């Protein structure tokens, strides 16, 4: 899935709970009057445009009153005046402008389709509970507070291990030798992390250590060679379901969209 589709999917997913909250907390918009909003140089501005912008204003906390509607009407007239001037100037015939118009049209269609799909295929509580359990089981029961020193060569890592064996302080060596700019000034401190945070060789070496011990051999990852020290271990402080439910719902909605797009691509004839 492209990044653009993902962005539209996220917007569509967010729009559903937002709209539901609006419906629950605000009165419905006033019934639309008949006829156009205004006529500019003989061109009528459909009232549907005003109602569309009014819905946006209501979502932002505005009141559905005469003042707001007058401001929206004025904005629509300004848009129409400028748009007509753009057409007269030939702007609409420019290739880049035509491309932008078509891309905007496509984006609106994609967003509306995804929004309708998510409304018809909502994430239910059972799905959220299943995802919560999956993430919790994947996270494991323990998290680790470790330090590391990252260097370019195995020889350098072995030299540092030798200094540690002679009594050198891990923090001092990290500040002096580590090429990890994010942790170097912290003495190599990686803070509390679950093993899945790290590449497997690093995680396996870290988990195998006793508290207060450092790795007896260099640990290689795609970043280079590590010397690891384990400072402490504790039970994972996993948040309750109620706290992470919104994030899980968003993740599951994005997954539904990804699956939908994959299915549509599989059925499409792409040459």
Image (cartoon, helix red, strand yellow):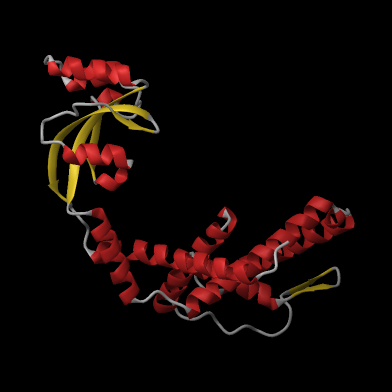
Residue 230 or residue 216, whichever sits in front: 216
Placement of 83 over or under 41, stated as above or below: above
Q: Is residue 205 visible?
A: yes
Q: Position of residue 214 (x, y in %)?
A: 16, 28
Query: Residue 212 falls in which quadrant of the image?
Result: top left
Residue 53 as seen in the image, left or right of residue 128:
right
Residue occupying image coordinates x 16% and y 34% = 230
Is residue 17 or residue 223 the one in the foreground? 223
> Is 100 drawn above or below residue 163 in the view shown?
below
Which residue shows up at 40% across the image and 62% down it?
A: 251
Q: Quadrant of the C terminus?
A: bottom right
| Vertical placement of residue 246 versus 191, above or below | below
Placement of 185 over or under 112, stated as above or below: above
Q: Would you identify the image quadrant in which residue 146 lies?
A: top left
Q: Position of residue 262 (x, y in %)?
A: 55, 66
Residue at the location (70% across, 68% down)?
269
Residue 132, percent from left and from top:
28, 65
Coordinates of residue 195 in the picture (x, y in percent)? 25, 45
Q: Report the side of 157 relative to 47 (left or right).
A: left
**Viewer-nearest residue: 27 or 100:** 100
Q: Is residue 78 visible?
A: no
For the point 79% across and 54% down, the residue is: 97
Tally of numbered discs: 0
Q: Quadrant of the N terminus?
A: bottom right
**Would residue 32 be found to the left or right of residue 224 on screen?**
right
């Amino acid at each position: 899935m492209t990044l653009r589709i993902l962005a539209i999917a996220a917007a569509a997913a967010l729009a559903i709970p937002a709209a539901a909250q609006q419906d629950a907390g605000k009165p419905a918009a006033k019934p639309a009057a008949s006829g156009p909003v205004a006529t500019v140089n003989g061109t009528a501005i459909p009232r549907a445009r005003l109602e569309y912008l009014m819905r946006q204003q209501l979502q932002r906390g505005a009141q559905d009153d005469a003042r707001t509607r007058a401001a929206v009407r004025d904005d629509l007239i300004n848009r129409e005046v400028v748009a007509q001037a753009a057409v007269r100037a030939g702007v609409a015939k420019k290739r880049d402008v035509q491309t932008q118009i078509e891309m905007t049209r496509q984006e609106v269609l994609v967003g509306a389709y995804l929004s309708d799909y998510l409304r018809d295929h909502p994430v239910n509580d059972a799905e959220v509970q299943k995802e919560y359990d999956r993430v919790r089981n994947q996270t494991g029961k323990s998290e680790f507070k470790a330090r590391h020193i990252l260097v370019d060569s195995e020889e350098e890592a072995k030299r540092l291990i030798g200094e540690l064996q002679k009594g050198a302080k891990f923090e001092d060596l990290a500040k002096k030798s580590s090429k990890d700019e994010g942790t170097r000034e912290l003495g190599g401190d990686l803070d509390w992390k679950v093993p899945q945070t790290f590449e497997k060789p690093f995680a396996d070496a870290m988990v195998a250590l006793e508290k207060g011990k450092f790795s007896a051999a260099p640990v290689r990852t795609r970043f280079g060679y590590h010397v690891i020290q384990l400072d402490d271990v504790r039970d994972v402080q996993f948040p309750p379901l109620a706290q992470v439910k919104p994030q899980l719902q968003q993740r599951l909605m994005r997954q539904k969209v990804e699956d939908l797009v994959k299915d549509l691509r599989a059925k499409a004839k792409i040459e």
